[in-house]
Image (tube, rainbow, N blue to C red):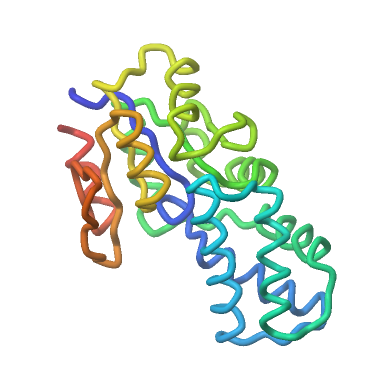
Amino acid sequence: MKYPFLLFDADNTLFDFDAAERTAHRRLCETYGLAYSDEGYQLYHRCNAALWREFDRGECTKDFLLVERFRRYLDATGEQADPEALNREHLRVLGEAAVLLPGALELCRELSRDHRLYLLTNAVESVQRARFARSAIAPFFQDVFISEAIGYGKPSLEYFNHVFQAVPGLSRENALLIGDSLSSDIQGANNAGLDCCWFNPQGLPRPEGLRIDYEVRILEAIRGVAGQ
């Protein structure tokens, strides 16, 4: 077997983070008396996504990102609230959401029979540990590597070097990284010299300048890739 070690991203690879985030935003608006609409959620989503891209490029810290996304959102809507309080409530609600993407549980259960599964994530540590502990896939994973606990995040080589040192038997030759993010997962695999599988359910075009060893549109297709 070529890939006895499978390194999975969490959000929007196994967890339905978009659904969890939308629910958290609606509850946040209800709690703080802010207007809720699909357009408002999309505005927040754009503010959040732009800052995570900055984080992936090393242009801001996570602590800055978490509050700044709400500051930018409030500036855009013209509403008044404490961005730090909004972030604390948002993280609390997210920690309660452990919604998996369709097929994720079955995939992890099956792959764990012949592979060693690890979760690699840049998410906030308190949120991700709470969500993972609540999830049905937790028993199938050997360990979880969260950037906030390590001190480095994907796609940095330092993050992956930590993973290599922490997992006995793991090497660049026997592991496959699986994730949806080009900027953190695929770029990280390129930086670390790992084979990678891009989970691309939206059918986005392949970018130039990145090595993508495998590409799948549905989770169940990872079975065939992992069995290489």
Which residue appears farthest toward the front when viewing the image?
Answer: 59
Which residue appears farthest toward the top when viewing the image?
Answer: 168
| Among the 4 quarters of the image, the one containing residue 174 | top left
| Among the 4 quarters of the image, the one containing residue 27 | bottom right
Tell me where residue 155 appears, x and y as whole percent: 43, 39
Residue occupying image coordinates x 57% and y 36%: 146
160 or 28, nearer to the observer: 160
Tell me where residue 87 appears, x and y as whole percent: 75, 61
Is any atom of residue 113 visible in this view? no
Residue 78 vertical position relative to residue 182 in the rendered view, above or below: below
Tell me where residue 115 appears, x and y as whole percent: 32, 27
Tell me where residue 95 appears, x and y as whole percent: 67, 52
Residue 148 vertical position relative to residue 42 in the rendered view, above or below: above
- Answer with left or right where residue 108 lies relative to residue 123: left
- Answer with left or right where residue 209 lies relative to residue 20: left
Residue 104 vertical position relative to residue 43 in the rendered view, above or below: above
Residue occupying image coordinates x 66% and y 44%: 130
Report the quarter where the C terminus lies: top left
Residue occupying image coordinates x 67% and y 85%: 36
- Answer with left or right where residue 4 lies relative to residue 68: left
Residue occupying image coordinates x 38% and y 44%: 185
Report the quarter where the N terminus lies: top left
101 or 22, nearer to the observer: 22
- Answer with left or right where residue 10 lies relative to residue 210: right
